[in-house]
Image (spheres, rainbow, N blue to C red):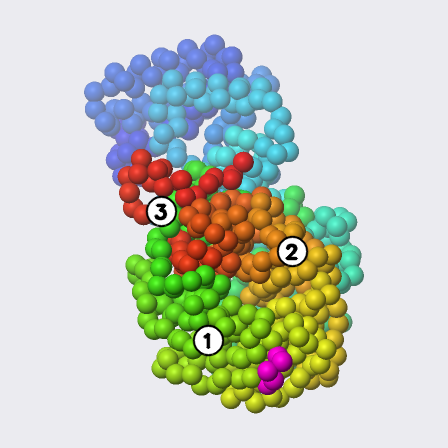
Amino acid sequence: TLASASSSSDSDTGGASPPPRKKHRASAAEGAGEPGASAVVTGLSGVVLGLATHSQATSAIHFNRSVVNNLSGSMQANGAGQGQESSELSCLNSAQNGESSSAGGTHSNGLLSSTDNGNSVGTSNGSSIGTSSAASTASGSEVGSLKKKKRLSQAEEDVIRLIGQHLHGLGLNQTVDLLMQESGCRLEHPSATKFRNHVMEGEWDKAENDLNELRALMHSPNAIVVSFPLHRPAQTSTSQSARMKFLLLQQKYLEYLEDGKVLEALQVLRGELTPLKYNTDRIHVLSGYLMCSHAEDLRAKAEWEGKGTASRCRLLDKLQTYLPPSVMLPPRRLHTLLRQAVELQRDRCLYHNTKLDSNLDSVSLLLDHVCSRKQFPCYTQQILTEHCNEVWFCKFSNDGTKLATGSKDTTVIIWQVDPESHQVKLLRTLEGHAYGVSYLAWSPDDTYLIACGPDDCSELWLWNVQTGELRTKMSQSHEDSLTSVAWNPDGKRFVTGGQRGQFYQCDLDGNLLDSWEGVRVQCLWCLSDGRAVLASDTHQRIRGYNFEDLTDRNIVQEDHPIMSFTVSKNGRLALLNVATQGVHLWDLQDRVLVRKYQGVTQGFYTIHSCFGGHNEDFIASGSEDHKVYIWHRRGELPIAELTGHTRTVNCVSWNPAIPGLMASASDDGTVRVWGPAPFLDSQEADGLNENCSNMDS
């Protein structure tokens, strides 16, 4: 008999001993306090260890099983069921919280099984369970400790569910099963599990029936995360289920069409989708897909991935937005939270000046995000001394490859920016501005540069930067004062004006197109729509002027003179240098003062500030105390004070293409180019901080 049992066992298991499930039950009973079971198991273990051959060991284990079966039966007859409970908890593919699995391929967490590392997911690691009486006793003690474990808080349960969802997405389903069993949590509601499985398997009739169970779980609409705009009316549970049913039937309809089952698809359209009386416009679009000649045409017109896992997963993502998270977690919730945390840390980082990357693989989740100030443009890289008098203005080209500087010495110098080293070198000098150059404006394509003079200058110069030739020298009247200019976005027109009441719109040849009388202009800016022009005037305000319908309106009103202003790329924010007040940030759309930046010394000199950095997160301005101040846009206190100039800093320009490059122009006759700290050892780099005062506190 023993030899027969050994032969049968070897043929069934390929020579390996079968998992000692019954032995495990006996040891669990021992852990529950059954002295008789303990004695039997200990004795049988000695028998197994003392056998000489593999076949004898296998025979003894079969004998062991029969004894334990008899013992378990007698224990159950006496009302001792603790061994059975321990066995259920130790099986990774048993039902969660006492609920049976819906299918052979379904895990205890309720999710569909898949293969993980080549092994069928959902199979318990039986080879490691019950290999010795000591291991079995440990398992029994774990069950005991689980019963004594305190109840998890809501936050702890949420974290476990988030981890479980993430592990399931990685295919680690056995780990998810064990996590849910040990914690006593449930990854999602059983009704949601059935619904998920039926959707992924394409069993649409069953999925529709599942909606009736889920409808009872859709409590108040406020508790449901929906993808509708805020201006739409609140969704009731009835409309929610109708929307979900519509999405299900739409997928069913498209899959029938792709399979060539036109009659079945037509039946779904007429008999199921249309009676819903929901989104009739979409039904008309769906009916048009009946004319598609082949599957590729259908997928292209419907912008649909086609029948299969991808489209059904996308469908589930949409459906999940209508269910409370207590029933079914939103898709990839842990990944979403981690991404939000990384983005928040970047937003709070004072010196973050690189392109935002939403991919979590580009950052470390083990450390907080911190940017070093040594990567920030607050160290002098070059001092340009080619001007021989005060430098009144500087401006980088729109593509960041050139820098233009204007001086009281009547010249404009064009500098070339090396894209690799970021070093600046002289390209050409433009001469002949009799009154000096106080303002410069690059055309949108950087082909032309317009130069304006101070208050008593009635002329304007339009240069071809590529050739160095003067294209236009414009002067409407000797009584004019053309001190400011702004390009129209089309690059074919510009507006110019001054404080003597002139406000013109001209073409590239200086021909007058339109004029606005009686406006004393301090600074100009053309909005991206090409119609509205913003102008600060002597009445301490900024007004919008429309040359097409000749209308104007007040946008900003200050209590002190506006010396200059600039506008962000998106046209939403305006940065003003206000006499005796400093730098102010205004929201042009809401027409409200957003922030007043502190630290800068601003009297009645014309000082030009700028937006800068990636996403224009930073603001820089010159100052009458010889410094350059830098703020983060969301903070009123400066994050850096750059020293080095010896007289008033008139203008600051941030390179739009190289976020780590900035230039400043000063009455000391120099232009300073600022960049990150050079690659020195830590002690030498720390020594550079004398040029860059830390204002983090």
Viewer-closest of 534 and 353 = 534
Viewer-closest of 7 and 507 = 507
Image check: 385 left or right of 449?
left
Q: Which type of secondary structure does the marked residue at label 2 adopt?
A: loop
Compared with 54, 431 (above or below) is below
- Where residue 137 appears, as percent x and y from the top left, is 43, 18
Viewer-closest of 53 and 70 = 53
Q: Look at 44% across and 71% down and name the residue there.
A: 410
The residue singled out by tag 2 in the image is 579
The kind of residue tagged 1 is His
The kind of residue tagged 3 is Ala
Q: Which range is magenta? A: 476-480
The numbered mark, 2 or 3, whose residue comes first in the sequence reads 2
- Where residue 540 appears, as percent x and y from the top left, is 71, 62
> Per the image, is 398 magenta?
no
Compared with 566, 72 (above or below) is above
The residue singled out by tag 3 in the image is 677
Determine whether label 3 and label 1 are within 8 Å by CB.
no
The residue singled out by tag 1 in the image is 433
Task: Report which quarter residue 384 is drawn in.
Answer: bottom left
| Label disc, if present, on residue 413 of the rendered structure | none
